[in-house]
Amino acid sequence: MEANKLNQEIVLLRKHIRMCSGTSEADLISNLPVSIVENIMGCLPLRDAVRTSILSREWRYKWVTCPELVFDFWFDQMFLGHHKLEKLVYLILKLHQGPLIKFALQVPAFRSCPDIDQWVDLMPNNTIQDFTLHISRGDNHKLPSRIFTFNQLRKLKLYKCVLYPPLGFKGFNKLLNLDLQNVDLVPQTFASFISACPILERLRMIDCTSFNCLEIDAPALKFLEFHGVFRSISFTYSPLLAEVIISFSSIDFGTGKCFSSNLITSLSCLPSLEELHMQAFALQELAEDGLPKKLPVTLETLKILHLSDMYFEKIEEIACVLCLIRSSPNLQKLKITAFTFDVVESVGEYLRAQNSSDCLAQLKTVDMLLFSGVEPEMEFVKYLLASATGLEEMAILPHAGSVSDGGESIMNELNQFPRASAKAEIINVKNES
C-alpha cells in the first residue's frame, strides 16, 4: 500500500519536473509543492527521511514534518554509533512539526528509562494513531498516564510494559488492534479496559499476567490470540469473533475437568467462530470421568481446527480430540502437529475399536505434521480416511528426526488404507517441497 502511494507521488513529481523544465535541478528539488514533499516523507522510513537533509539547504529540516517516527534496528545501525539513543529521540521529537501519526521504538537491547515519559510528553495526543514501545531488557516500564489520553489511537503494541489505566479512564474509542507481550496487567480491571475499546478487532496477549478468569467483552473482536495461563475464560459478548488461538504456558491448571469443560463451553458460545488453534492436551481432562464419545455442546460454525503438541501415547488425549472432531459437524480443515515419543499398545487398540461408520462429511483437507509413523498415528489416520466421506487431500510431513527414508515407507503403508472418499489424495509434503 505504501509502495503504491510512493509511486503516485513519483508520477506527480515527474509532472512537476516537466512543468519546470526550464529551471535548474537544485531549484526543482527546492520548489516542490508542499503536498508532494509531505507525502514523500510519509512514505519514507525515518532513516531515509533524515537523509533528505543533504539534498539542498531548503531540505535540511523538511524531515521534521515526517508523520511517522520509527526507531528500529535499521535506525540503530545507521545513526546511533556513539550517540545516545535517549537524547537523539528526545531531540527529534523536540524538533518535530505537524501531526505525528505513528511512533515506534523497537531497537535492540533497549531498557526502561525515565526518558520514555519525556518523549510521551512531547507527542501530540490528538494525532497519534499507531504507538509501539518495545522494552527488550530489564524491568517492565510503567506507562505514563498521558498515553491514556491518545484519543486517536488505532494500534497499540506494548512489550515488557506495565499497563495500569488511571482512574476515570474512558477507553480508546478508536482502537482496532491491541498487541501485548510480557505486559503486567490488573486482571480484575482488564475486562472493563477491553469493553472500553468498543471497536477493537484484534487482540494478542503473549505471556502477560495470569488470569483466574479471562473475561472478553468485545462486540467488534474478530481475532484473539492468547499465550499464557488462565483457569477459565468467558466471552461476555463477542458475536464477530472468528479466529481464536490459545496456547498455554503451563499444563497444571489445577481445576480438573471443569477447566476443559469451561473452555469448550465458552468457545461454543461464539456464533462466528470458524478457526481454532490450541494445544491438544488442554482437552484431556474431559476424560476424567471416562473416555467421552461426544461433547455436551457442538461447535456448529467451526471450519478450521489446528491441534498442536498432540501426544499420541495418551489415550485420554486421543479420545478427547476425536470427541472434539465429531462435535464439529462443519469442520473442513484439520491440522495436527504430533508430539510422540513412546508407543502405547492400548492407544492403537482404542483407535481400531472406533466406529468406522462415523461420518465426517464436511472434512476436505487434513495436515499431519511431524509424523513419525508409529502405530497410534497410523491408526488415527486410518480412522480419518475411513470416516471423511468428502476428503480431498491428506498432507503428511514426516518427522525428520524419526523417519529415515523421507517418509516413503509410511506413504506406502498409508496408500493401502481404505478411504471413504474416492477423491482423497495422500501427499508427502517433504517430497513436494
Image (cartoon, rainbow, N blue to C red):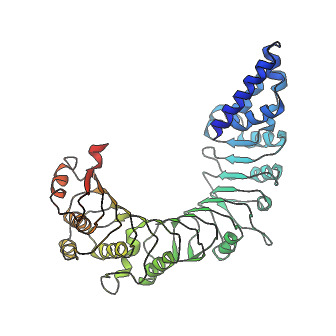
As displayed, is residue 289 above or below residue 34?
Answer: below
Residue at image point 16% right, 53% down:
412
| Quarter holding residue 148 | bottom right
As displayed, is residue 414 above or below residue 44?
Answer: below
The quadrant of the rendering that contains the C terminus is: top left
Q: Where does the image place residue 399, in percent across and percent down from the top left?
A: 28, 53
As displayed, is residue 198 above or below residue 59?
Answer: below
Between 220 and 189, which is closer to the camera in this rendering?
220
Q: Is 132 left, or right, of 127 in this rendering?
A: left
Residue 267 appears anywhere in the view: yes
Q: Where does the image place residue 377, in percent across and percent down from the top left?
A: 24, 64
Q: Where does the image place residue 296, in percent across and percent down from the top left?
A: 41, 84
Residue 248 appears anywhere in the view: no
Residue at image point 72% right, 47% down:
103
Count all numbered tags in the image, as a single digit: 0
Q: Is 426 left, or right, of 173 in this rendering?
A: left
Q: Is 319 left, or right, of 275 in this rendering?
A: left
The quadrant of the rendering that contains the N terminus is: top right
As displayed, is residue 18 above or below residue 212?
Answer: above
Between 171 and 387, which is closer to the camera in this rendering?
387
Q: Where does the image place residue 385, in percent across and percent down from the top left?
A: 24, 64
